[in-house]
Image (cartoon, rainbow, N blue to C red):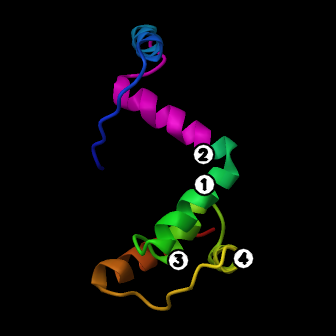
Amino acid sequence: MSRTTATIPDDLTDLMEGAIRAGIFENKSDAIRHVLREYFEANQNARIAAAVSLYEDGEITLGTAARLAGVNRFEMRDILREEGVELRFGPEDMDAARDEIEAARNLE
């Protein structure tokens, strides 16, 4: 799991601290994870845009892009084509191959 630093306005920090004290969240990390998950669950277009951007920059594979976007590989391939993103075929290295295998295992 990666670590990220964020600057949050005081009023949101206060609400987050209050929610932690009220037992809504375990800690700040839990609160931020929860809010991000809810945001991306409620905003499918944002999930897809993020996945397309990461794929286009070569940071993730097609399988990972599909998982992040919440679609299957075939739908992701079509989305990428619609967005004018050139598809890459086959993993570039062993890490990418493992990533593809893991993404395939997680498909429904």
Q: Residue 60, how many percent across, how many down?
A: 43, 71
How far apart are the two marked residues, 2 and 3, measured between alpha carbons? 19 Å
> In front here: 10 or 69?
10
Determine whether 11 is above or below 94 in the image. Answer: above
Mark 2 residue element: helix
Tell me the tag on residue 62: 3
Classify 10 Å Cα crowding around label 4: few (below 14), some (14-19), many (20 and above): few
Q: Earlier in the sequence, mark 2 or mark 3?
A: 2
Secondary structure found at label 3: helix
Q: Quadrant of residue 91?
A: bottom left
The residue beneath circle 1 is: 47
Q: Quadrant of residue 40?
A: top right
Q: Amino acid at mark 4?
A: Glu
- Magenta-drawn stretch contains 24: yes
Q: Count the numbered circles shown.
A: 4
Residue at 29% of width from left, 36% of height from top? Answer: 5
- Marks 1 and 2 close (CB-CB < 8 Å): yes
Magenta stretch: includes residue 94: no
Range shown magenta: 23-40
